[in-house]
Every structure is written in structure tokens, then in C-alpha cells.
Amino acid sequence: MAELTDRQLSQYARQLILPQVDLEGQLKLQSTRVLIVGAGGLGVPLAQYLAAAGVGYLRLVDDDVIERSNLPRQVVFAESDIGQAKVGVLAARLQSNNSDVDLDPRLCRFEPDSASALLEGIHLVVDATDSAETRRLIDRTTFNLTLPWIMGAAVRTAGQWAIFDADRKFGCYHCLMADGSHDGAGGCAELGILGPVVGLVALQQALLAIKWCLGADLPWGRLQLLDAWTDEQTQISLMRRDDCPLCSDASR
């Protein structure tokens, strides 16, 4: 059985004493390979917490550069980083926090022609985009490869998140948002966003990812909705649609 070094025992000491983690769980984290699609408001805190927890491999996908308007919510970036590729700067910051993590920054989009290569060797996918179409693509490609994935979205002062099982026994994103449908009136650039709101959603995604790595029970088939301004939270149970183009029995 693999062992942790003295440095790792010291670095992860506070989570190793948790019965939900312990030595076996830490080794599970180190052996997990996660793809994070997006290195913006959701992707930054999400990646920071997964790397700090000791998730062994993180593939970061984004083709954007850092802009001044990103700084209020993508707090790992500095003014001196403006104009640089997000994935490169983020990977460097994560590596400086935890040299054990294998960082794989990819300066590209998650698109039909790149999805196959980006998913190669991956165990879990986490969506940190602001695009319903990209989420549908993640849903389709992970379904075909029998991979679980975690979605997240935030705009204005509201956010939502959900985790989809590998076999889609509890429904899929297409059950929520069919091809051609739109999941909102616009993105953050049009409608605005409050920085801590994306942080709240990203932390929920990070917690789900860590719990998945550890083999904990998860809220499959449940969409969590948060209004951070009013502190209202709602949970919606999902069901596989009989006419779903992706996961229904008729489509298989």
C-alpha cells in the first residue's frame, strides 16, 4: 500500500484526523484525476481547494486571458497578471501551494473536436463554465464515456449546482436543459455577478468532488438552487425524462 511522506503527513494533518478522510481517503484523493472546464469565477476557487486538499491530478481547460474585470471574483489573480492566460497563471499558483499536485493546463475550449482528448484518463469532470451549450456537451461526452460530472452556475446573486452519476440513473443535464434551450437571460457580462456568490457555488462543487473521491454518499439527482441575497435555498429532485434525447431508455 502506498504511504504518505512526512511532509505530506504534516501538510494534510488537519484533514487526515477526520474519520471521513484518514490515510486511506488521502491516498484516494492523490490517485484521482479531475478535469475542470473553466478557469474563471467558479474554476479558480474550485481548483484552489481541490489542489490544496491533495487531489493528485488537475487538468485545467480555458482559452481566456485575465482581464481587470475578472479580479473582484477570480481572487487568485493579480493586477500584474492582466493579459496572461488564465490556465497558466492558475496552474502556477496552485503548484506553489502544493507541489504534489500534477497540473495540466490546456489553453483551449471544451468543444466537440477537443473533448475526446481532454477527457482522456479523467475520472471526474467539473463544469466551471458560463455556457449551457458547453454543459450539454459535457453531459453528452461524459455519458458516452460513463463518467460522473458536477455542474455549477452563478449569475447576479443566484447560483445552482448538481452532480450527475456516471450511468445517469437519476437523470442528466439534458433532462433539465434540452438541446437548443437556454438556461438564462444572459451571462455575468450582461447581468452582473457578486464575487462571493461564485465562491459559494464553487465551494459546494469542491466539496462534492472531494466527497466523490472519498466514496461518500452524494445527492445524486438533486439540483440545488441558492439565492445568496435572501439566503433562500431550494432543492429540486430530478427525474429521467421518458423523452430525454440522452439518457432515456428509448435513446440507448
Image: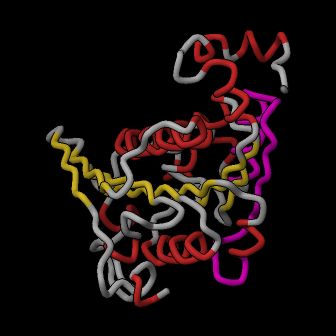
Whether the magenta-drawn stretch holds residue 172 is answered as no
x then y, percent, for residue 125: 59, 57
x then y, percent, for residue 4: 81, 19
Left or right of residue 185: residue 211:
right
Whether the magenta-drawn stretch holds residue 105 is answered as yes
Left or right of residue 54: residue 206:
left
| As drawn, 189 above or below 140 | above
Residue 51 visible in this rendered orientation of the protein: yes
x then y, percent, for residue 77: 62, 41
| As drawn, 172 above or below 72 | below
Indicate the colouring scheme: secondary structure
x then y, percent, for residue 112: 65, 83
Query: Could you tell me which quadrant the N terminus lies in?
Result: top right
Residue drawn at x 32%, y 73% as measured from the top left = 240
Residue drawn at x 81%, y 30% as measured from the top left = 100
Question: Which region is colored magenta?
Answer: 86-114
Residue 93 visible in this rendered orientation of the protein: no
Left or right of residue 119: residue 249:
left
Location of residue 81 by image quarter = top right
